[in-house]
Structure formats: structure tokens, C-alpha cells
Image (tube, rainbow, N blue to C red):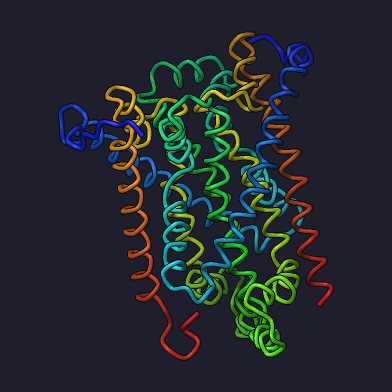
Amino acid sequence: MNYAWNWGVLVQSPYLEWLGQGIAMTLAVSIAAWIIALGLGTLIGIVHSGASGMVRFATGSYINLFRNVPLLLQMFLWFFVVPELLPKAAGTWLKRDLPHPEVVTAIVALGLFTASRVAVQVAAGIASVPRGQSMAARASGFSTVQAYRLVLLPQAFRIVVPPLTSEFLTIFKNSSIALTIGVYELTAQTQKIQSFTYQGFEAFTAATVVYMTIALMVTTLMAIIERKTSIPGPTARG
Amino acid sequence: MSGFDVSVILGALPFLAKGLGLSLGLTAIAMIGGLALGLVIAIVRLSRFRVLATLAALYVNGFRAVPLILVIFWFYFLVPLLLGRPVGALYSVLIAFVMFEGAYYSEIIRAGLKSVRPGQWQAAQASGMSYLQAIRLVVLPQALRKMAPLMVTQGVVLFQDTSLVYVVSLHDFMTSASIVANTQNRIVELYVFAALVYFALCTAGSTLAQRLSSDRQRAH
């Protein structure tokens, strides 16, 4: 193998700045999308678990639609197709006047996509709370909202912490797909460094190390949350 | 934008079908290769060879921590360098997908092998079987039934992930749709059509996975 190593390229200007900007963009897109995903996904998951008829069909359709189309294509649909389908003024605003349209689109697309995955986990978490709990809540005279708020959700949220950890990890990785609509996040920046300097080893190693560090930090954070929120007693260890 | 023009899709069907063929072929090869590699990794991770088991764990956790696009870029850059000559995007992508999927499939297989009751392992060993014989003749056949739905689900995810070869300009279904969309200036038609095709195929896969998992529950 014929390769001229130059690790110094990573701390040279402007490549160091590119890396820093890439990391910042990956974190910003992922965390903003996670806020959408967590809020909307929790809401859809709760509604899906309790509803029947048309409402359940609607939440189920949302979940199936967003899970069965590739995220890359979803980004394209939001970025290229939706502005065409909207009324002319709104479409023009999206394309011309919205600041950083590619970043906003990436956040929305990633958030709505991940919301469907969060909804599945939340609905499964609520379903795994023993049935006697909801019966006991009913027997104590709780309304449906009270039963969810005071009995089912506090237990379900603890159950879904581990699967949500894995969704949170995945959102950082999936944010790399935003590069296809022109967002210069970490993977795009290292690819740019590679094509400018031909130091692919160094550039991709830097990206790999950063992603691994993010994964380690998320895992640690979620383990702390799991420990802090666990109910003391013999059933606490899941 | 003037109306939804179906004729542009019909005209491009042969080109799109060729792209879909590449997507499905890539899925099949990555699935078979990933399963084979995943099986080896899972067996090594559960074995008594500590050093090998640790290396296998590092492999799995490493691949699972990084995005698939980065893995594709890595191999696109690395494979020609290692071989000392250009090999084209397809071979780099194939290797990237097999190695990446191997990490994910190994986790499914490992969980499946671990879910078989310890008594089965002990009985196999008491009958004089070696570690590999016990896996092949006793544990794996039982684990397979539990793993089948998850393997199909992972296959659906994998099929969606093949769209990422867009970043190295391989003409899969997604990229073909994008090429027609831009050359014919029919963005809405092509991307909506592509979404419908992906949705139909992935829903079929998800339904199969659900049926496999409810069959298994009924059998118990």
C-alpha cells in the first residue's frame, strides 16, 4: 500500500475549522431533530396505544408511512417535492426566503422520521405495563387521562429508556444523510477534507472517532438517566 | 408545476427497473454475506477464546457506532488503495455493506443463540458434542425460529439503506429515480413514484416479518 501519512492535516487551517463546523452541525441537527422526535413520537405513541377506530388508523398510518420509505428519499421529498405541492407563495418562501432551507429541512425530515420510531417504542412500553395497573386505576375512579398521567406513563417511560437510548444513538448517525441535500455536517466535511487533501485515512479516522465519542457520551448519559429514574425495589432491575 | 405526468414514469420504467434490480441484488448479497459473517462473529463472541471474543465485540461496536454513509466513504476510499488499482464503486460498496450488515446480523444471531435454554447446551455437551457441533445441530436450529422475524426486519432496513449508494453515484433505484427526475425535470412525479415503490416493497417485508413472529407465538 502506497500512502503518504500526514496526521498534521487535521490541525491545519482551514481543515480544523471544517471539522469543528461539521461536529457542531451534526450535534445541532441531531439534537433539534431529537426534540421533535421525542415530543411528537411520545404523543403519537400514547394516542396509538389508547385509541381505536379512525384515530388508531391515522397514528398507525403515520408510523407505517415514515418507517417504510428510506430516510434519504424522505429528505428529498421534503426538500424538492413539498415546495412544489404547496401554494405558490408558500413554496417560494420555502425555497427563497427561509434561512438555511437545507438545515431546516434536514431537522424536520429527521425529526418526523425518528418520531415514528419513538412512537413504536412508547406504544410498546405502555403495552408492557401489566394490565392490572390500568384496571386498578379504573377501579380507583381515575379518568383515562389520570390513569395515563399518574399510573401508566410513569411506568412506561422507565421501560422505554433503553430502546430510546438506541434511537437517540441512531439519530446522530442518521443525521449524516442530511449531506445529500447539502448540509455540511461531520461526514460531509471529512469527505470534503478528503477530496481537497487526499488524506482520506486521517479525515475519516477523525469522523469515526467523533461518532464513537458521541455514542459513548449518549450511552453514559442515558445510563445515568436510567439509574436516576429507576424505581427502588426488587423489580427495579430490568 | 402542471399536473401529474404519469407518461414520464412509464417512459422511464426500463431504466428504473434496472435500478431496482441493483437495489434488490445489493440487498440480497449484503444479506447473505452479512448473515454468514454475522454467524461467524456471533459464534466467536460466545466462544471461550477471550481475545478473539473481545476483537469481535470491538468490530461489532465499532461498526454500530458510525453512520453507513461514512462506512461507504471509508471503503470507497480504502479498497482501491489496498488493492493498488481502481475497482469501481460497486465492489467497494458491496464490501462495505457486507461488513456493516455483518455487525448488525451478528447481534441478532447472538441474541438468538443466547435465548436457547442453557440445558440444551449442557445436554449437547454431555452427549459428547464439540462447541461447533452443539451450535450446528442443537442450538442454531432452535434459535433460527426466534431470529427469523428479526432477520426479515433487518432485511427491510437494509433494502432502505441501499438507497445510500446515491453518495457514490451507483445507479440503484433511488439514484435512477433522481437521474430521471432531474433530466426530465419531473421531480414530483419521480420522487412520489419512488416513495410508493419503496413503501409497497417494505410494507410487504414488514408484513412477512409480523406473520413469522405471530406464527412462532402460536407454535408455543
Give the answer, above or below, for where A174 lies relative to A154.
above
Q: Is residue A33 or residue A73 the one in the foreground?
A: A73
Is residue B172 toward the left or the right of residue A181 in the image? Answer: right
Is A178 on the left or on the right of A210, as rendered? right
Residue at 57% across, 65% down:
B42
**What percent of the width, then of the height, locates residue A133?**
61, 82
Q: Give how far across and how far down residue B6 sits, in percent.
A: 77, 15
The residue sitting at 62% across, 61% down in the picture is: B39
The image quadrant that residue B165 belongs to is top right
Counting labels gives 0
B161 left or right of A51 in image: left
> Could you tell me which residue is drawn at 73 percent across and 32 percent down?
B197
Q: Nearer the viewer, residue B92 or A140?
A: B92
Residue A50 image position (x, y, % from top left): 66, 64
Relative to B89, is B135 above or below?
below
> Would residue B216 appear left or right of B159 to someone viewing this image?
right
Q: Where residue A53 sits in the image (x, y, percent)?
A: 76, 55
- The N terminus of chain A: image quadrant: top left
Residue situated in front as seen by the camera: A69 or A212: A212
